[in-house]
C-alpha cells in the first residue's frame, strides 16, 4: 500500500529524515515510535505532501506520489489525522462531516447528506451534537470526530499522529475502539504514538525511528524487549 | 541616458536618508512587536505638523521647535502604543486593522485642525544652495545626509555594542525567553516604539523641508517604509535601511531617466515604491537579505 | 413615523438607497474573501475602481450600452483579481496585506497619472445613465429600482455560495489549511476563485457607481473608501451574511446624520473619516478576542 524509499528531508541545514525506508502492506496496522525529534511527524508530513523531500521515493497504491500536491494525494485515499486536532472548531460537527462526504456524492440532496453524516456520528456516539460547534467538544471527542471524518472521506490509508495526545484516559478506550473499527473495515493504519501500551493492542508491527532512520521493525513483543530500544529511550547500556 | 547623474546620486542620498530614518523605526517596531504599523507614515506627518505648530504659532525657532515636536511625539507614541497596538499584540491580523484605523483617525484630526491644503516649511536653509563640484545642495540637505548617518550609526552602536541593544535583540528574537531572563518586554517594547516614533517625527520634519506636507500623505509614507522593509527583508533592520537607500536611488533615477527622449511623468515617482514591493513579492518575497520561509 | 417615510421617499432617501445598494454589493463580496477566507484584501476597492473606469470609458468613448459596459466591467475586474492573486495568494498574512496594498496603490497611481486615458484627477464626466427598454433612468427612483435588482441578485448569489460547498471549503482552509487539503481541497484554487468572484462583484458595484454619479475620479476609490467597506464587514461580523445588511445601513446612515448637525460641508469628509475609523477601532477592540481566531497549522 505504501512504500517509502530513502527519504531525505532537512530543515535549515539539519537533516531530519536521513534516508528513511519502510513498507506497509494493505490492511496492516503499524505503530511508529521513537524519541522526540526523530522525524516521525516530519515523515507523516512528507507522505501527506506538506513537506517536500530532497531525495527518495514515495509509492502509494503503486503510484509514485512525491510530485503530487497534498489535496491530490488525499483524493487518492491518503488520510491524515493531525496531532493538534485537524477538525474545524468554528464549524458544526455536521459541517465537518459534510466537508468529507460532499465531494464523493455529487448528486445527493442536502437531506441525504445529513443522514449519512448522522450515521457516521452514531458510530462515535455524537449524533446528538450534530449541530454543535466542533470547538465545544472535548479532546477525545475531537479525536473521534476527526478519525470518523477521515473514514467518511473515503481514505484507505490512515496516518494517525499521536491519537491519544490530549485525550483523557477514559476516552482512550473509545479511540482504541474506533481504530479497531478501521481495522475491521480493512483500512491500513499507521499510528505515531508514545504510549506503547496503547498501540501494542492492535499493531501487528512496530517501527522504531531514531535520528531520521528506521532502526527496528518487528512485532510488539520483540520490540518491547529489545535492548537497542531501551538504549534509545532510556540511554541504558547493555 | 541619465541627465545630470552626479546630482541625481546626491538627491538619492538625500531621499534615501529620509526613508532610512523612517524605515529604521518601522523595522524596530516590527522586530520587537511583529506587527506592521500602518500608521507609521501618519506619525511622520503629525511630527511635521507639530513642528510647524511650534515654529509658526509659538515661534520657538528651528531647534526648539524640533525638540518640542520630538517630546510631544514621544508622548503621543506611548498613547498610540497603549491604545491601538498593545491590546492586540497577540493577533497577527488585528494590529494591522487597528493601525489602519489609527492612521485614518490621525489624518482626519490633522485635516480638521490644519486644513487639507499643502504646507511647506520655508527657510533660507532650505532654499539657498551651495554649489560643490557642479552639484547643488542646501544646508538642510547636508543636515539630512549627515544626521541620518549619525543617527543610524548610533542605532547600530546601541544595537550591537550595548546591553540595551542586546536586550532589544533578545525580545525581538524570542520575547518569552527574554522575559524568563528578567528582561521587561513591556519596557523594551515601549522604549523601541518611542524611539521609532521620534525617528518618524524627525523624518517627517525633514520631508516638510525637502518637499511639502499634506495631511493625506501618511498612507504613501507608510507604504514607502513598507517597501524598504520588504526590499530588505522583513526581519532585518540593516536590510531595511539598505532597502531605503535603494528606494531613494530608484525614485530619483526614474525622474532623470531619459530613454531617447522619453521620460517618465514625475507623478509616477511615488509609484516606484509600490511597484518595487510587487516585484520583490513576486520574485523573492523574503527580500534581498531576509530568510526564506518567512514570506510564502 | 410619517417624517421617516417622508425622508425615505424623498430625493435624499432615494440617493441613500442607491448608495446602500452599491455598498452592500461591495461589503458582501469583501465578506467572502475577508470574512470567510480571512484574506486581508486591501485591493478590493481597486477592483471597484477598475469596474467604474471601464464603464466610464466604454460608455463615453464608445457609447456601448449598459449590458456590455456592465459585463465588461465585471470581466476586467475579474482579470485584475487573477493578476493580483498570482502575486499575493501564495504569501502569508503580513506580506499578503502589503501586497494587496501595493497593488491598490499602483492602480491609484495609474488612475491619477495616466492622463491620456483616465484624465487623471480631473476624472471622467458625462457618463450617461443606462438605457434599457425606454425606461428613463435619469429619474433616480428608476435607478434605485435597477440598483435594487442588481443588489438582490448579488446577495442571493453570495448567499448560496456562502452556505454551500464552496463557502464551507473556504472557511475550512481559512481555519486550518492543511486539514482542508487532507480532505482533498485544492486550497490555492479555492482562494483564487473566491478572489475572482469577489472582484467581479466589486466591478459591478463600480460600474453602478459610475452610472449613478455620471462622473468618476480617483478620489472615490481612495484608501479611506476601502477602510469604509472594511469597517462594514467588521462591524457586521466577518463571515456573517445577514450582518452585512445591518452594518451597511449603520455605517452609511451614521455619517449622513452629521448633515443634520450644523457641521460645515467642508468638514463633512473628515468628520465621516474620523467617525468611521473610530467605529472600526471600537468594534475591533470590543471583539478582539473573538474576531479572528488564529489560523492553525501543522
Image: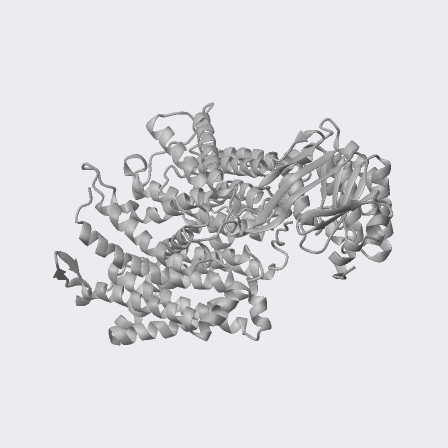
Q: In the rendering, at what x and y percent does residue B41 appear?
A: 38, 59
Q: In the rendering, at what x and y percent does residue B130 appear?
A: 13, 63
In the image, is residue B268 above or below residue B109? above
Seen as rendered, the residue at the extreme front is A238
Residue A119 is left or right of residue A88, and the answer is right
The residue located at (53%, 66%) in the rendering is B86
Residue C190 is left or right of residue C273, and the answer is right
In the image, is residue A15 above or below residue C70? below
Task: Please tell me in which quadrant of the rendered image residue C125 appears.
Answer: top left
Task: Name the foreground residue: C58 vs A229.
Answer: A229
Across the whole image, how many numbered discs are drawn on residues?
A: 0
In the image, is residue C294 above or below residue B124? above
Q: In the rendering, at what x and y percent does residue C252 appear?
A: 50, 50
Task: Name the foreground residue: B45 vs B248.
Answer: B248
Seen as rendered, the residue at the extreme top is C133
Q: In the rendering, at what x and y percent does residue B227 appear?
A: 39, 52
Asked if one can make out residue C13 in the rendered structure from this viewpoint, the answer is yes
Amino acid at each position: 500500500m505504501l512504500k517509502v524509499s530513502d527519504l531525505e528531508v532537512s530543515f535549515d541545514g539539519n537533516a531530519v529524515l536521513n534516508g528513511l525506508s519502510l513498507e506497509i502492506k494493505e490492511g496492516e496496522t503499524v505503530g511508529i515510535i521513537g524519541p522526540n525529534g526523530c522525524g516521525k511527524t516530519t515523515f507523516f508530513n512528507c507522505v501527506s505532501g506538506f513537506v517536500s523531500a530532497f531525495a527518495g521515493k514515495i509509492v502509494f497504491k503503486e503510484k509514485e506520489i512525491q510530485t503530487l500536491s497534498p489535496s491530490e494525494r488525499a483524493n487518492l485515499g491518503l488520510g491524515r489525522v493531525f496531532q493538534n486536532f485537524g477538525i474545524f472548531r468554528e464549524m458544526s460537527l455536521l459541517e465537518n462531516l459534510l466537508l468529507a462526504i460532499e465531494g464523493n456524492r455529487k448528486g445527493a440532496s442536502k437531506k441525504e447528506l445529513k443522514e449519512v453524516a448522522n450515521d457516521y456520528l452514531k458510530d462515535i456516539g455524537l449524533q446528538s451534537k450534530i449541530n454543535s460547534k466542533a470547538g465545544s467538544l472535548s479532546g477525545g471527542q475531537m479525536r473521534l470526530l476527526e478519525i470518523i471524518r477521515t473514514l467518511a472521506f473515503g481514505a484507505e490509508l490512515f496516518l494517525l499522529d499521536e491519537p491519544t495526545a490530549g485525550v483523557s484516559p477514559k476516552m482512550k478506550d473509545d479511540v482504541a475502539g474506533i481504530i479497531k473499527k478501521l481495522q475491521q473495515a480493512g483500512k491500513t493504519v499507521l499510528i505515531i504514538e508514545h504510549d506503547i501500551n496503547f498501540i501494542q493492542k492492535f499493531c501487528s508491527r512496530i517501527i522504531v525511528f531514531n535520528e531520521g532512520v528506521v532502526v527496528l521493525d518487528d512485532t510488539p513483543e520483540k520490540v518491547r524487549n529489545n535492548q537497542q530500544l531501551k538504549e534509545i529511550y532510556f540511554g541504558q547500556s547493555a | 541616458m541619465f541627465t545630470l547623474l552626479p546630482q541625481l546620486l546626491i538627491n538619492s542620498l538625500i531621499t534615501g536618508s529620509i526613508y532610512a530614518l523612517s524605515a529604521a523605526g518601522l523595522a524596530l517596531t516590527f522586530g520587537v512587536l511583529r506587527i506592521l504599523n500602518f500608521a507609521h507614515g501618519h506619525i511622520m506627518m503629525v511630527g511635521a505638523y507639530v513642528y510647524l505648530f511650534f515654529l509658526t504659532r509659538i515661534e520657538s525657532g528651528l531647534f526648539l521647535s524640533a525638540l518640542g515636536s520630538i517630546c510631544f511625539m514621544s508622548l503621543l507614541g506611548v498613547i498610540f502604543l497603549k491604545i491601538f497596538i498593545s491590546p492586540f499584540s497577540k493577533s497577527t491580523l488585528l494590529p494591522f486593522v487597528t493601525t489602519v484605523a489609527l492612521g485614518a483617525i490621525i489624518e482626519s484630526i490633522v485635516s480638521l485642525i490644519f486644513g487639507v491644503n499643502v504646507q511647506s516649511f520655508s527657510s533660507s536653509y532650505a532654499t539657498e544652495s551651495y554649489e560643490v563640484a557642479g552639484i547643488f545642495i542646501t544646508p538642510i540637505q547636508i543636515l539630512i545626509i549627515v544626521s541620518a548617518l549619525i543617527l543610524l550609526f548610533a542605532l547600530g552602536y546601541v544595537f550591537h555594542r550595548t546591553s540595551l541593544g542586546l536586550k532589544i535583540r533578545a525580545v525581538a528574537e524570542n520575547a518569552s525567553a527574554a522575559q524568563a531572563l528578567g528582561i521587561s518586554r513591556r519596557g523594551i517594547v515601549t522604549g523601541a516604539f518611542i524611539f521609532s516614533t521620534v525617528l518618524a517625527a524627525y523624518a517627517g520634519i525633514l520631508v516638510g523641508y525637502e518637499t511639502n506636507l499634506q495631511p493625506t500623505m501618511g498612507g504613501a509614507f507608510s507604504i514607502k517604509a513598507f517597501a524598504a522593509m520588504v526590499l530588505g527583508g522583513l526581519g532585518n533592520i540593516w536590510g531595511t535601511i539598505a532597502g531605503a537607500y535603494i528606494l531613494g536611488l530608484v525614485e530619483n533615477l526614474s525622474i532623470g531617466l531619459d530613454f531617447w527622449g522619453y521620460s517618465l511623468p514625475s507623478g509616477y515617482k511615488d509609484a516606484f515604491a509600490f511597484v518595487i514591493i510587487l516585484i520583490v513579492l513576486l520574485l523573492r518575497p523574503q527580500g534581498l537579505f531576509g530568510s526564506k520561509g518567512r514570506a510564502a | 413615523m410619517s417624517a421617516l417615510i417622508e425622508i425615505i421617499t424623498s430625493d435624499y432617501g432615494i440617493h441613500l438607497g442607491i448608495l446602500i445598494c452599491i455598498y452592500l454589493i461591495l461589503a458582501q463580496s469583501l465578506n467572502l474573501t475577508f470574512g470567510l477566507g480571512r484574506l486581508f484584501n486591501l485591493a478590493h476597492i481597486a477592483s471597484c475602481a477598475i469596474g467604474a473606469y471601464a464603464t466610464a470609458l466604454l460608455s463615453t468613448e464608445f457609447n456601448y450600452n449598459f449590458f456590455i459596459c456592465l459585463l465588461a466591467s465585471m470581466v476586467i475586474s475579474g482579470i485584475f483579481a487573477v493578476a493580483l492573486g498570482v502575486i499575493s495568494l501564495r504569501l502569508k498574512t503580513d506580506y499578503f496585506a502589503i501586497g494587496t496594498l501595493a497593488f491598490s496603490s499602483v492602480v491609484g497611481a495609474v488612475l491619477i497619472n495616466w492622463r491620456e486615458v483616465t484624465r487623471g484627477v480631473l476624472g471622467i464626466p458625462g457618463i450617461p445613465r443606462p438605457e434599457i427598454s425606454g425606461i428613463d433612468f435619469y429619474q433616480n427612483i428608476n435607478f434605485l429600482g435597477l440598483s435594487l435588482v442588481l443588489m438582490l441578485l448579488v446577495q442571493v448569489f453570495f448567499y448560496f455560495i456562502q452556505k454551500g460547498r464552496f463557502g464551507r471549503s473556504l472557511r475550512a482552509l481559512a481555519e486550518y489549511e492543511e486539514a482542508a487539503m487532507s480532505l482533498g481541497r485544492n486550497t490555492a484554487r479555492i482562494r483564487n476563485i473566491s478572489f475572482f468572484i469577489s472582484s467581479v462583484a466589486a466591478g459591478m458595484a463600480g460600474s453602478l457607481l459610475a452610472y449613478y454619479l455620471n462622473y468618476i475620479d480617483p478620489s472615490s476609490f481612495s484608501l479611506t473608501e476601502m477602510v469604509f467597506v472594511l469597517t462594514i464587514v467588521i462591524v457586521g461580523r466577518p463571515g456573517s451574511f445577514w450582518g452585512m445588511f445591518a452594518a451597511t445601513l449603520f455605517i452609511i446612515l451614521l455619517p449622513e446624520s452629521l448633515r443634520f448637525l450644523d457641521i460645515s460641508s467642508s468638514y463633512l469628509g473628515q468628520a465621516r473619516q474620523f467617525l468611521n475609523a473610530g467605529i472600526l477601532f471600537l468594534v475591533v477592540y470590543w471583539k478582539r478576542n473573538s474576531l479572528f481566531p488564529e489560523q492553525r497549522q501543522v
